[in-house]
Image: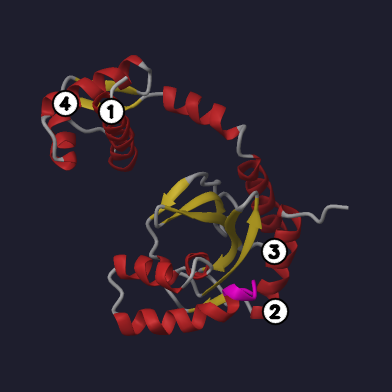
Amino acid sequence: MTNNQQSAGRQSFNRGIRILEILAEGGASSASAIAAELGINQSSVSRLLQSLQQSGLVHKPSYHSFALDLGILRLAGIAMTSFPIVKEAVNVCNELHRKYAYGFSVATLEQGNLLYLAKIEENVDAGIEMVELGSFPISQSSMGRCLAAIQGKDAFSRLLKKEGCPPREIKTLWEESEATSTARAEVYLKGVGLNKSNAARVFDRDGRHYALAVFSQKKIISPSQSGICLTEGIQKLCPQKD
C-alpha cells in the first residue's frame, strides 16, 4: 500500500467516525447537511454513509435522512467488555446514591470534553447516563476543573480558553484548583452552575485520570460530608491491593 493510499484510508476513517459523532449528537441528518458540516463534497459523504449503512452502523429512517442504527449498540456492547471501569462506576454511583441520596458521577476528559462513565441524579427514578460527552462547561464543574488541573497549567488554560473564559478568570480558577488537584484533595464548589454544591476528586486507574463527583441541586453538601462520600467511592473504585 502506498503512502497516498494509507493517507486516504486514514482520512476516510476519520470522516466516518466524525459522521457517527454528528448523528449521535444531533440525531438524523441528510447527506447534504453532513457534507456542509464536514466541509467536503456530498458525493464523498454519500459513499461513506453507504459503507456505514452496509456495516449496520447507520440506517435511513426516511428517504433523505440518515441515523445511527442498532449496530452501534452491538459495537458498544462488545467494546464495554474491555472497560470494566464503566460497570464498576455505574455500580458505585448507584450504591452511593442509595446510601446518601445525592447525585454522583464518574468521568474523564476525552478530547477536551467531560466523558461520563456513569451519572445518576438525585431523583429516585433517575437513570444512569453512561459514556456521554458532557456539554457542561469545565469551568463550572468540580470534576472538570480537577481533571483539567491535573494535566498542568498549560492544558488547564487551553481547555478553559476554548470555553471562552477570559485570561484573568482562568488565572483565578487555576490558582483555586492547582493545590487541591496536586494534593489529590477535592475541588469543592458552592453555588456554581446548576448545583447548590458539587465536589470532585481525581483518582488514577489503569494509567488514566478519572474523577468521582458528588453534587446536589437541592441542598448544600458540606465539605466534610462530600469528603466522606468521595473517599468511600474512590476506595470502592480503587481498592487497595494486598
- Which residue is identified by label 2? 224
Marks 3 and 2: CB-CB under 8 Å? no
150 vs 104: above or below: below
Q: Nearer the viewer, mark 2 or mark 1?
A: 1
Q: Which mark is residue 100?
A: 3
Identify the amino acid type marked 4: Ser
Q: Which mark is residue 3?
A: 1
Q: Nearer the viewer, mark 1 or mark 4?
A: 1
Across and down, in percent, residue 50 comes to 25, 18
- Which element is circle 1 on? helix
Identify the amino acid type marked 2: Ser
How far, Cα to Cα, is label 3 from label 4? 52 Å
**Residue furthest top in the image:** 54
- Circle nearer the N terminus (1, 4): 1
- Which residue is identified by label 4? 44
- Circle nearer the N terminus (2, 1): 1
- Circle nearer the N terminus (3, 4): 4
Across and down, in percent, residue 135 comes to 37, 57
- Circle nearer the N terminus (2, 4): 4
Q: Residue at x 28, y 39 (%)?
A: 22
Quick one: label 3, few (<14), some, or many (20+) residues within 10 Å?
few
Q: Nearer the viewer, mark 2 or mark 4?
A: 4
Q: Determine whether, in the image, residue 16 is placed left or right of residue 153.
A: left
> Could you tell me which quadrant the N terminus lies in?
top left
Marks 3 and 1: CB-CB under 8 Å? no
Q: Residue at x 28, y 79 (%)?
A: 166
Quick one: label 4, few (<14), some, or many (20+) residues within 10 Å?
few
